Image: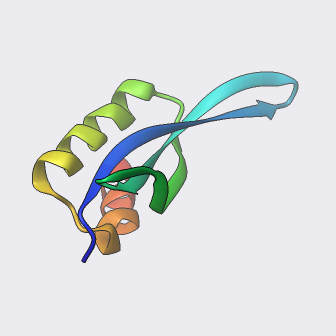
Amino acid sequence: MVDVKYYIVEKTLTIEGETRSSYGIAAYASNDRTNIVKVVHDISFDRSKVYSMVKLFNKLSLSTIHLADVVNDMIE
């Protein structure tokens, strides 16, 4: 298993003429910020909500195999 560090990723979306930022989470190899191991886009328009997830995932050293499931559980 590769050691990872989670970060927020931002994507700009245009919905019905309105431009908004959508936030997701990317897992990078901890020693290489250019190497994305796994990413989940468009989790929320609320940056602070996604930031809280990132902090928790880094604290718990969440495995990337669980990333999508944990995100889904947390937003439901």
| Count of marks placed on residues | 0
Q: Position of residue 43 (x, y in %)?
A: 49, 46
Question: Residue 20 lies in what quarter of the image?
Answer: top right
Taking the spot 29% from the left edge, 54% from the top edge, the residue there is 30
Q: Nearer the viewer, residue 28 or 15?
A: 28
Taking the spot 36% from the left edge, 25% from the top edge, the residue there is 48
Q: Position of residue 34 (x, y in %)?
A: 49, 50
Task: Classify residue 44 as left or right of residue 16.
Answer: left
Taking the spot 38% from the left edge, 41% from the top edge, the residue there is 7
Question: Residue 10 lies in what quarter of the image?
Answer: top right
Task: Classify residue 69 as left or right of residue 55.
Answer: right
Taking the spot 30% from the left edge, 53% from the top edge, the residue there is 31
Task: Classify residue 25 as left or right of residue 42.
Answer: left
Q: Nearer the viewer, residue 32 or 48?
A: 32
Question: Residue 1 lies in what quarter of the image?
Answer: bottom left
Q: Residue furthest front?
A: 31
Q: Position of residue 36 (x, y in %)?
A: 48, 58
Above or below for 72 versus 22: below
Above or below for 12 versus 7: above
Q: Residue furthest left?
A: 60
**Model colouring:** rainbow
Q: Position of residue 45 (x, y in %)?
A: 54, 31
Q: Residue furthest right?
A: 17
